[in-house]
Every structure is written in C-alpha cells, then in structure tokens.
Amino acid sequence: MKKDMSKIANIFFLLFLSLASYAQEVDEHEKEKALRTSINLTWDGNIALSEDKFIDAEVDYRKAIAKSPDNSIAPYNLGNAYYENETYNEAFGRFKEAGETSTSKEEKHKAYHNMGNVFMKRKDYAKAVDAYKEALRNDPTDEETRYNLALAKELLKKDEDEKKQNQDEQDKDKENKEENKDQDQKNEGENEDKKDQDQKDEGDKGEQNEDKKEENKEGEGDQKQDQKKKPDQGEGDKEQEEPQPPRPNQLSKQQVENLLRAMQNAEKQVQEKIDAKKVKGVKIKNEKDW
C-alpha cells in the first residue's frame, strides 16, 4: 500500500513538472510573439517619425512599449522624439526606462548618455555628471560622452562658485541689514530721548512763560493802580521825560552865549567911555615936594 502511494506521488510530481515546463514554453512563446509585435510597432513608429508624423509615431511607440517590456528600443526612440520636440521631462522618463530595461551595455550607454543631455538642458549639472559617468561605465571608449562629462564638471564648478558668491553676498547683506537695524533702533532710542527732553524743555519754558505772564499781569495791575492814584503827576513826569521838539526860529545855546558875550562887550565899552569923561573933568593939582 505504501509503495502504491509513493508511485502515485511520483506520477503527480512528474505531471506537475511537465505542466510547468509546458506553461513556461507557452509563456516564452507568448513573450517572443509579443516582442516581435512590439518591434514591428517600433518600426512603424520610426517610419512615422521620419515622415514628420510625430503624433502617429508617439502612438506606435506607446503601443510597442505596452506590448512588451523587453523592448528597450521603443522607449529609447520615443525619448529621442520627445528630446527633438524639446519635451525634456517626457524624454528623460523614456531614457530612464530604456536604461533600466535594457540588457545590452551599448543600449544602456546610449540611454544614460541621453539622460545626461537632458540634465544639461535643465542646467542640473550634478545629475548630468552622474549620468555621463554611468554611460562611460557601459562604454569607456566613447569620447563624446567623456567630453560631455568634462563640460558638465566645469559648468558644475562654475555654478557652485556662483552660488557660493551669491550666498556670501546674501550673508553680507543680511549682516548689513542687522547692523542697520541695530543702528536704527539706537537712533530711534536717541530720538525718543531727545523728544522727551524737548518736551520737558518745552514744559519748563511754558511754566516760565506762565510765571512771566503772571508777573507782567501783576506789574501792569500795580502800574494801573498808581496811574489811578496820581494821574496828573504821571502825566507831568511823562511830559518831562519826553523831549520837546525845537520851536521854529529858536536860538541855540551857542548862539545865546555869543549874544550875551557881545552884549557884555558893548556894555563894557559904554562904561569905559563914561569913565573917561569923568576923568577928563577933574582938575589936576600941582604939588611939589620941594
């Protein structure tokens, strides 16, 4: 009984292997059939693209890609079509797909080389360097890829230097802004202090003016009171204090003095004449001393 069961198990195992092998053969056959169909669609896409029928070519390439994932030529050619049409995002996706699905080093090299070209268009030089390096790993003899790699490195260095310079300028501007902000705050504080001091000075000045006004009011009150008490005296003093304007034909002080001096001289001459006459009338006595 045990021997019969063992024989049955072996039969089922052999049957399973046969079915699996048959299924694998069928699957491989289907894959080969799908790949042939995909290649034919790729060829149709190439023809349409050569006739400048971009839409038709895009449709054929997409059908080819959907028919067989093993066909790396279809996404690569579609990527080239997008690249020529300057649709770089779509081109990059198709080049990446071709590089990941391809088993040929030559096809991988072409896919990564073109990925590097897309990154150069985007000015993403760091990723372009990585893509060109991957392309050279699959084909180290390609001088065009080597040249593109050197150019990408040079542009990357220039870009990094410019970014560093811009960052330094931004840091400097930020530092200057901080310094200006601190200075503005300092000036604002000083202005506030000055404003407070000015307000205080104005307050003190106002108080002094108020006191002066009060004093003037008191002085005016006293003056008015004195004027009420002595109006005549005040008017007399005012007349004495105010100089009188000269009257018409009034002699000056010098003219008065000259006139008085002339009158005195005239009076003296008259007196001398009178005295002379008196002397002349008196008799002279002749007295001798012998």
Image (cartoon, rainbow, N blue to C red):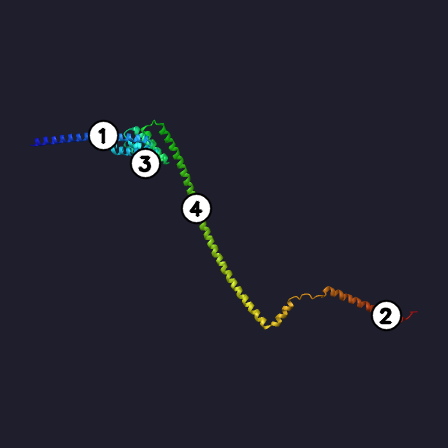
Q: Of the two numbered discs 1 and 2 on the same chain, state the one appearing first in sequence.
A: 1
Which amino acid type corresponds to the residue marked 4 in the rendered image? Lys
Residue at label 1? 33
Which amino acid type corresponds to the residue marked 3 in the rendered image? Glu
Taking the spot 76% from the left edge, 66% from the top edge, the residue there is 259
Q: Quadrant of residue 262?
A: bottom right
**Badge number at residue 90:** 3
Q: Of the two numbered discs 4 and 2 on the same chain, state the one appearing first in sequence.
A: 4
Q: Quadrant of residue 65?
A: top left
Q: Of the two numbered discs 1 and 3 on the same chain, state the one appearing first in sequence.
A: 1
Q: CA distance from mark 4 to mark 3?
A: 44 Å
**Badge number at residue 277:** 2
Q: How many marks?
A: 4
Which amino acid type corresponds to the residue marked 1 in the rendered image? Lys
Q: Quadrant of residue 19?
A: top left
**Crowding at mark 3 (Cα within 10 Å: few <14, some 14-19, many 20+):** some
Q: CA distance from mark 3 to mark 2?
A: 159 Å
From the image, state whether disc 1 or disc 3 is nearer to you: 1
From the image, state whether disc 3 or disc 2 is nearer to you: 3
- Identify the image quadrant of the C terminus: bottom right
Q: CA distance from mark 1 to mark 2?
A: 187 Å
Residue 129 visible somewhere in the drawing? no
Residue 45, given in percent of the width and then of the height, sits at 29, 31
Taking the spot 82% from the left edge, 68% from the top edge, the residue there is 270
- Identify the image quadrant of the N terminus: top left
Which amino acid type corresponds to the residue marked 2 in the rendered image? Lys
Residue 248, given in percent of the width and then of the height, sits at 70, 66
**Badge number at residue 177:** 4
Disc 4 and disc 2 in contact, CB within 8 angstroms: no
**Badge number at residue 141:** none
The residue sitting at the right extreme is 290
Q: CA distance from mark 1 to mark 3?
A: 28 Å
